[in-house]
Amino acid sequence: MATRVLIVDDEALARDVVRHYLGKWPDVEIVGECATGANALRDIQRLKPDLVFLDIQMPELGGLAVLERLPAESRPLIVFVTAYDEYAIRAFDAQALDYLLKPFDQARFDRAMRRALEEIRHFHSCRVAEGIRELLDQDSRLPNDSRRPSRLGVKDRSKTVLLKVDEIDWIQAARDYVSVHSGGRSYLVDQSLTMLEKQLDPAVFQRIHRSTIVNLERIKELQTHNNGEYFAVLEDGSRLKVSRTYSAKLAAVLNVK
């Protein structure tokens, strides 16, 4: 999907420079250009760009005033373009992504573009992951256990992967996330271990520690440890501690005497 860009500057030459530098970047669509702050407000709301290159000093309505009048929930990413450095602190206080001081070259422009595209990719990735998580949460609230989700949305770099639940080996809490281990790889999921546990079939996935859930079908052996604790050794060689709180239940499920 192309990144939608709006160019706003009261100087035609300045707009030409930005348009020229954007020519190096594939998958970028210039959806419009305008020369006043009033037109910028109109076009941002009408065209809904992902990214705006916005001049700070313009007649009647400057770039900072434009940004202040945009609803926070619908603001695009803003890169200010100006010949004046004294506005930089105000620009970043207003949560601008970058501040290009004229004259700038292609290399400096490209740094701003890389930052913008990374932010846009992160935003879309989070939106996709959130949508998948909502669908899975809805599915997990259904009374019929047979309707449990068969796949789990997990993060893999800048994309979201739909991982088959039956391919999960074990899961571990990782601060505000959980780390899902499958086939020698690990993926992050943005939810708590308790929330994720509610979505999984308890006949297959069981907690063995306050921070660990294991796929029972992956356990190859249990090794006795101290004070009624075990280590669960999985088929992939992972060795997971089973705390006393969960050891008796696990032993019963696995029919270990």
Image (cartoon, rainbow, N blue to C red):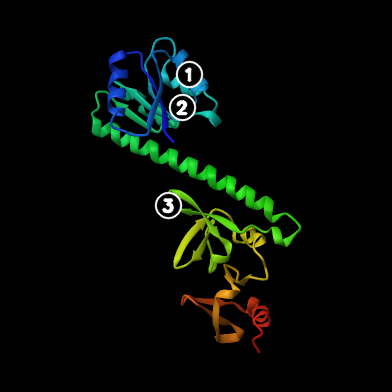
128 sits left or right of 143 in the view: left
User: Residue shown at 58%/71% (left/top)?
Assistant: 215
Where does the image place residue 93, in percent across and percent down from the top left?
A: 44, 31
Residue 241's label in the rendered image is: none
Residue 171 in the image, given as x and y percentages of width and height: 54, 66
| Residue type, numbered disc 2 | Pro
The local secondary structure at tag 1 comes to helix
Residue 138 seen:
yes
Specify which label sits upstream in the sequence, 2 or 3: 2
Judged from this view, the residue extending furthest toward the right is 143
- Using a 10 Å C-alpha cutoff, classify the residue at mark 1 as few (fewer than 14 neighbours), some (14 to 19) or many (20 or more): some
Residue position for label 3: 157
203 shown above or below 91: below
Residue that label 1 marks: 43
On the rendered image, what quadrant is the C terminus found in? Answer: bottom right
Question: Closest to the observer: 70 or 257?
Answer: 257
